[in-house]
């Protein structure tokens, strides 16, 4: 039922009286305050629905006469029957009846003055409800988000509708990822750091087109496949000069030094390989290009020393040469350390003091810049008589890793210059951006759904959600209503 403004105000007046009565009865019954709070919220939702209905009714039906001429100069006829569209707000659904214009009934509706006057969205969901729903969706499963909205607002949303909403909102993030304002120079650090890594996302298996296979998986077949999401970050940080002894002390105590500078204005992003208009867009390449643009925005004159922190994946270093050739490449120390432990466990039990001593001795050499000495030592150990083939092969992989990356392992120079040597920011981004949401128990994704979620989570984690959403609304309103949004300008034709 569509109410007039007078009817809506009358209903709101009665609801307000009921609200006063509710509070008085709660007082007389000595109700517990949390029960009063819940009841009060339910009453306020009803009151909000009535007042929103009154607001819409006050705007009229948008009738501009039999013909209207839009600001663009187009002339359209008023269609004989008003059209009603649903509007789903945080207070509940309400129908909106309005006069529409076009060439004739059954053809495309060309102009709806009331939609422009009210600034209605393209879909049924209000911008506020969409905003709140997606805040839930980017933090937890779609089903959990729907349950939270039902518990809090009494609104029922299917998983399918929330997934669709997620993709619609993410389309704007994909076309305009640089929502953040450029940080003030006095809030930036001395160094620019660019870092990237990859994290697998569990994907849904494509539907089978041939005969169904036996339900039991064959040997070596995994329950699900993963596709790589390339995650990166740009931030600035002050120099922090350290010695090898200080690094060893931190690692042994597993505690960072208190005076260590913190990253400034960290910006994270993620891309997956996808096909756009028949062309394959490599996620790694797209990410590196995006972070290069962010670097240029943050340091347009490239006056700061730029550091590139990566693990040993060759494809990442090749992308660095293409997009960030001016950076100082540094191999992440934690990946170096992992290989040392692998070497240690070829000779000593895991968790033993002997294994720890093995690692500490050679890590000190690496931090002192003596990479070739460590490689030579490991080659000597690889020749140990009666060393099992499996362990000999493990040592060979460690030696190859250090040999291939020796140019990015000048840790004595990096420490003396105050450069960061660990890619904890990239590791953290992989965890917070990807793992914490996309790898929850039982989750499987389509490529489109995973990328949409990554775009929105990155926007949220960058602390730019409010700015992003306002820009999204402004952009959609301009597309829908042009200059008429919020105040349609019509002239009667004839």
Image (cartoon, rainbow, N blue to C red):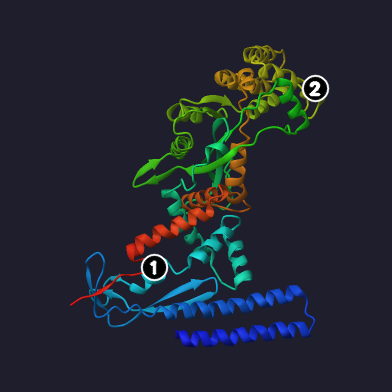
Left-right relation of 59 to 219: left
Give SS at disc 1: loop
The answer to whether any part of residue 415 appears in the image is yes
Q: Which one is in front in this view, the residue at disc 2 or the one at disc 1? A: 1
Q: Which residue appears at 72% of the width and 85% of the height? A: 24
The answer to whether any part of residue 212 appears in the image is no
Dot 2 or dot 1: first in sequence order is 2
Q: Which residue is label 2 attached to?
A: 354
Left-right relation of 42 to 327: right
Q: Position of residue 13 (x, y in %)?
A: 57, 86
Q: Position of residue 56 (x, y in %)?
A: 44, 77
Height in image: 121 above or below 273? below
Q: Residues within 10 Å of mark 1 (few under 14, many from 20)?
A: some
In this view, the residue in front, 248 or 453, is 248
Q: Residue furthest right?
A: 353
| Marker count (numbered) | 2
Which label sits on residue 132? none
Q: Residues within 10 Å of mark 2 (few under 14, many from 20)?
A: some
In this view, the residue in front, 403 or 325, is 325
Q: Which residue is label 1 attached to?
A: 486
The image quadrant of residue 472 is bottom left
Give the Cα distance between marks 2 and 1. 73 Å
Q: Residue furthest front?
A: 186
Q: Which residue appears at 68% of the width and 11% of the height? A: 380
Height in image: 313 above or below 267? above
Quadrant where the C terminus is found in the figure: bottom left
In this view, the residue in front, 247 or 389, is 247
Q: Position of residue 178 (x, y in %)?
A: 46, 45
In this view, the residue in front, 441 or 151, is 151
Give SS at disc 2: helix
Left-right relation of 360 to 229: right
């Amino acid at each position: 039922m569509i109410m007039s403004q007078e009817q809506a105000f009358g209903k709101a007046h009665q609801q307000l009286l009921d609200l006063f009565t509710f509070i008085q009865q709660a007082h007389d019954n000595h109700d517990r305050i949390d029960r009063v709070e819940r009841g009060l919220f339910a009453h306020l939702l009803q009151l909000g629905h009535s007042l929103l209905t009154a607001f819409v009714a006050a705007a009229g039906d948008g009738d501009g006469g039999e013909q209207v001429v839009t600001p663009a100069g187009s002339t359209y006829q008023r269609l004989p029957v008003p059209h009603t569209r649903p509007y789903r707000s945080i207070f509940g659904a309400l129908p909106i009846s309005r006069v529409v214009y076009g060439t004739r009934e059954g053809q495309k509706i060309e102009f709806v003055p009331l939609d422009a006057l009210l600034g209605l969205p393209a879909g049924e969901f209000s911008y506020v409800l969409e905003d709140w729903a997606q805040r839930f969706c980017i933090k937890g499963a779609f089903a959990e988000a729907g349950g939270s909205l039902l518990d809090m607002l009494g609104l029922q949303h299917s998983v399918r509708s929330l997934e669709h909403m997620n993709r619609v909102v993410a389309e704007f993030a994909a076309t305009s990822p640089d929502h953040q304002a450029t940080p003030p120079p006095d809030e930036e650090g001395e160094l620019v750091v660019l870092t990237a890594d990859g994290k697998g996302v569990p994907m849904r298996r494509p539907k089978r087109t041939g005969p169904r296979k036996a339900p039991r998986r064959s040997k070596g077949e995994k329950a699900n496949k993963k596709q790589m999401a390339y995650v990166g970050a740009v931030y600035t940080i002050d120099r922090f000069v350290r010695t090898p002894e200080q690094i060893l002390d931190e690692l042994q105590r597993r505690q960072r030094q208190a005076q260590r500078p913190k990253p400034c204005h960290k910006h994270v992003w993620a891309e997956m390989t996808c096909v756009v208009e028949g062309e394959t867009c490599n996620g790694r390449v797209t990410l590196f290009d995006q972070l290069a643009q962010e670097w240029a925005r943050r340091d347009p004159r490239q006056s700061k020393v730029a550091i590139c922190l990566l693990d040993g994946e060759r494809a990442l270093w090749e992308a660095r040469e293409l997009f960030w050739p001016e950076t100082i490449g540094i191999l992440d120390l934690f990946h170096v350390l992992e290989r040392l432990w692998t070497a240690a466990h070829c000779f000593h039990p895991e968790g033993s003091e002997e294994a720890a001593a093995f690692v500490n001795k050679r890590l000190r050499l690496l931090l002192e810049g003596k990479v070739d000495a460590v490689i030579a030592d490991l080659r000597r150990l690889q020749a140990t008589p009666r060393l099992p083939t499996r362990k000999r092969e493990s040592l060979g992989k460690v030696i190859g890793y250090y040999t291939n990356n020796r140019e990015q392992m000048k840790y004595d120079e990096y420490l003396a210059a105050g450069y960061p040597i660990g890619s904890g920011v990239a590791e953290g981004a992989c965890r917070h951006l990807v793992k914490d949401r996309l790898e929850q128990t039982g989750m499987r994704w389509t490529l489109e759904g995973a990328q949409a979620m990554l775009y929105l989570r990155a926007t949220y984690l960058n602390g730019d959600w409010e700015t992003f959403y306002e820009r999204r609304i402004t952009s959609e309103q301009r597309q829908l209503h042009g200059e008429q949004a919020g105040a349609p300008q019509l002239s009667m034709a004839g």
